[in-house]
Image: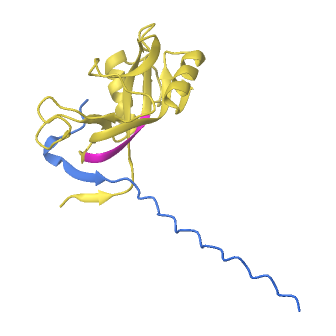
């Protein structure tokens, strides 16, 4: 395929998108049972 | 200086659609021994540079045009031009019977060398295809195999 003059060629780099790293889920502390009086 | 981007490059190209191990597959238009894999990218290789293709100063890499019009121009050179009158641009003639062709958009990424009329790329995968000289059943087979939109033109 004739894609044009090689003298005009320039290079680009297409890099993959970086996937966001999920933050760890907060650890749930067990709520303290109310102490009956 | 090399430009680095996260935007996948869109090109246009032609493929032959030929039987390969019992399935209709996309085959490079000019390199008939190169069958495009399904559901994984085609990776450029070169007998000189191996997996470093494409490199500047050589002809290796996966080729595509910048525009659909340029791909159609190659199709016209291949099939001949159907004569028509008036202001409409000449339509490409249909390919020879039993020799279907796919015209389509292709996604390019990795190292991409940009020229005036097109690209040479390291990785490529078809994005959408227009099947010329094939029927709806063939379009459905290609759609299922490559998981891309295929329209029987």
Residue B84: percent from left, percent from top: 46, 20
Residue B139: percent from left, percent from top: 55, 21
Residue range of the region highlighted in magenta in the rendering: B105-112
In the rendered image, the vertical position of residue B56 relative to residue B62, given as above or below: below
**Residue placed at 32% from the left, 37% from the top?**
B65
Q: How is the image coloured?
A: by chain
Query: Residue B136: which quarter of the image?
Result: top right
Lateral position of residue B25 relative to residue B111, left or right: right
Q: Quadrant of the N terminus of chain B?
A: bottom left
Which of the two residues, B51 or B6, is positioned nearer the viewer here? B51
Q: Residue furthest bottom?
A: A37
**Residue placed at 87% from the left, 88% from the top?**
A36
Look at the magenta stretch and give its main secondary structure: strand
Q: Is residue B69 visible?
A: yes
**Which lettered chain is shown in yellow?**
B
**Residue placed at 38% from the left, 24% from the top?**
B15
Which of the two residues, B132 or B48, is positioned nearer the viewer here? B48
Residue B28: percent from left, percent from top: 32, 24
Q: Residue furthest right?
A: A37
Query: Residue A15: which quarter of the image?
Result: bottom left
Give the colour of chain A: blue
Residue B122: percent from left, percent from top: 27, 41
Q: Residue furthest front?
A: A37
Q: Is residue B80 visible?
A: no
Q: Quadrant of the C terminus of chain B?
A: top right
Lateral position of residue A18 relative to residue B50, left or right: right
Q: Residue furthest top?
A: B97
**Residue placed at 37% from the left, 53% from the top?**
A16
Lateral position of residue A13 relative to residue B6, left or right: left
Q: Is residue B122 magenta?
A: no
């Amino acid at each position: 395929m004739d894609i044009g003059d090689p003298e005009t060629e320039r290079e680009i780099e297409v890099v993959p998108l970086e996937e966001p790293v999920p933050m760890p889920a907060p650890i749930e502390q067990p709520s303290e049972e109310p102490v009956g009086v | 200086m090399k430009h680095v981007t996260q935007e996948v490059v869109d090109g246009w190209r032609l493929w032959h659609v030929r039987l390969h191990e019992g399935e209709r597959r996309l085959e490079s238009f000019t390199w008939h021994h190169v069958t495009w894999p399904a559901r994984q990218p085609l990776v450029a290789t070169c007998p000189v540079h191996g997996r470093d293709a494409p490199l500047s100063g050589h002809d290796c890499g996966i080729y595509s045009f910048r525009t659909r019009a340029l791909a159609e121009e190659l199709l016209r050179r291949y099939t001949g031009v159907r004569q028509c009158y008036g202001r409409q641009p000449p339509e490409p003639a249909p390919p020879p019977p039993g020799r279907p062709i796919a015209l389509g958009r292709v996604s390019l990424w990795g190292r991409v060398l940009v020229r005036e009329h097109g690209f040479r790329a390291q990785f490529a995968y078809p994005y959408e295809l227009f099947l010329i000289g094939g029927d709806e059943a063939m379009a459905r087979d290609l759609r299922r195999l490559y998981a891309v939109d295929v329209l029987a033109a």
